[in-house]
Amino acid sequence: MGGEESLDPGAESGQLCGRAGAGAVRAQVKPMPAVSSRQEAPKMRLADFIEANTPAILAEWELFASSLLPAAAEMDAAALRDHAEQILQAMVKDLRTPQTRVEQSAKSKGRAPVLLGATETAAQTHALLRATGGFTIRQLVAEYRALRASVLRLWADSGAYGPGAMEDAGRFNEAMDQAIAESVDYFTSEVDRWRAIFLGVLGHDLRGPLNAVLLTSHVISTLSSGTPVSQHTEKLMRSGQRMRQLLDDLLDFNRTSLDIGIRVTREPVDLATVCREEIELLRSALPASTIEFATEGGTQGSWDASRIKQVVSNLVINAARYGDRSGVVRVSVRGDDADAHLSVENTGPSIPKELMNSLFEPLRRHAGADSHGESESLGLGLFIVRQVALAHGGSAGVESAEGRTRFTVTLPKR
């Protein structure tokens, strides 16, 4: 790796005792047997050196880990050394395992082969525990950086390295990089998982008071019908309904983030009837848009009607926002023997090819979203469309050329 990780004694590991606080005592490397001036000092391969001096290396690890505050403040020695010994043992095993140049290159880039059915590595388990223990990813990587410098410095100080030192140092750095890659991957996955859980809980808990606000607004609207207050209550209800839609989108997004997927409840329905009902509501909500609807073939199947309405709403609103204001939004349902195909088409600027693949990704919005009044959107509409299609065993795609854009959702009838 870089010069700062060479066999020259590292300044970083040399500061570990000072960081851990006064009174800490560094464990000593096992002394080499005494030899006369005419004899060469006995040499050790790096794997043998690590194995023989694991206690000293672990002491350096513990001292540095104890300085990573505030997470380490309440940890005992066992927690501070968490899986460090197993990580070292894995590196020793790796140093003693023959490898080709191709394997060496892949490992140095964090792409070592993974055995099917293998359990978590020590580095992966260590990352999970550090994530749940309140460490940051910078602190996690700092542990490995200090461990690398400590091992190489202690080996250099011992004078035990021989002709194979460069090869051993290279292999050690590759093994260390692989451990870092495994830890970072698991750490970020765990952090993302808990973030999704938090947002899901937040969204779920907010629905209770929001429903109370909507119910109260409805009651006030009924009592104040025809008075100057009614327009204000209607605005309050529309805002509350918009907030509920955003919360529903957030909950759906979190379900997919946790690999739970969007939940659907299938029942026999007529897809044409479901779409027609939603379009009638959309015509009232989008008075400036002309929405046409057509059907062809059999449209009976087993689907989640509420989710299908969600798909229709998201696609039509998307078409109204980005299509020509004076254009027509065309919704069509076509059924064949096995599938039903729901399409929403609009005229307007074609979607650039470089954006086509990212349209269905979460938290993405069109470059002109704000100018189209989408500043309140989370950028989850098209993402949810595809997830609903996948939950039904179907698919969602888009075509855009020559001023026409068509989104198509294919839904298996059974």
Image: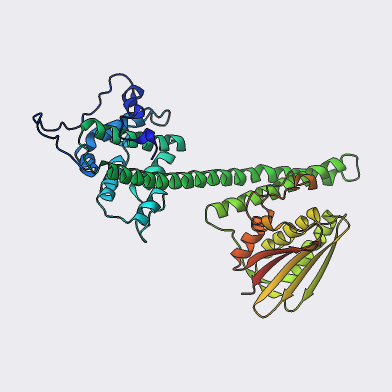
Image quadrant occupied by the C terminus: bottom right
| Side (left or right) of 73 relative to 409 | left
**201 or 195, which lies in front?**
195
Q: x, y (%) of residue 17?
A: 31, 24
**210 or 145, which lies in front?**
145
Q: Which residue is painted at 31% across and 44% down in the image?
A: 172
**28 or 41, which lies in front?**
41
**Residue 28 appears in the figure:** yes
**125 or 298, which lies in front?**
125
Q: Identify whether 126 is placed above or below 386.
A: above
| Side (left or right) of 403 relative to 355 | right
Q: x, y (%) of residue 330?
A: 81, 65
Q: x, y (%) of residue 242?
A: 74, 47
Q: Identify whether 115 is placed above or below 135.
A: below
| Side (left or right) of 3 relative to 40 | right
Q: Which residue is painted at 68% across and 66% down in the image?
A: 409
Image quadrant occupied by the N terminus: top left
Q: Identify whether 137 is placed above or below 338.
A: above
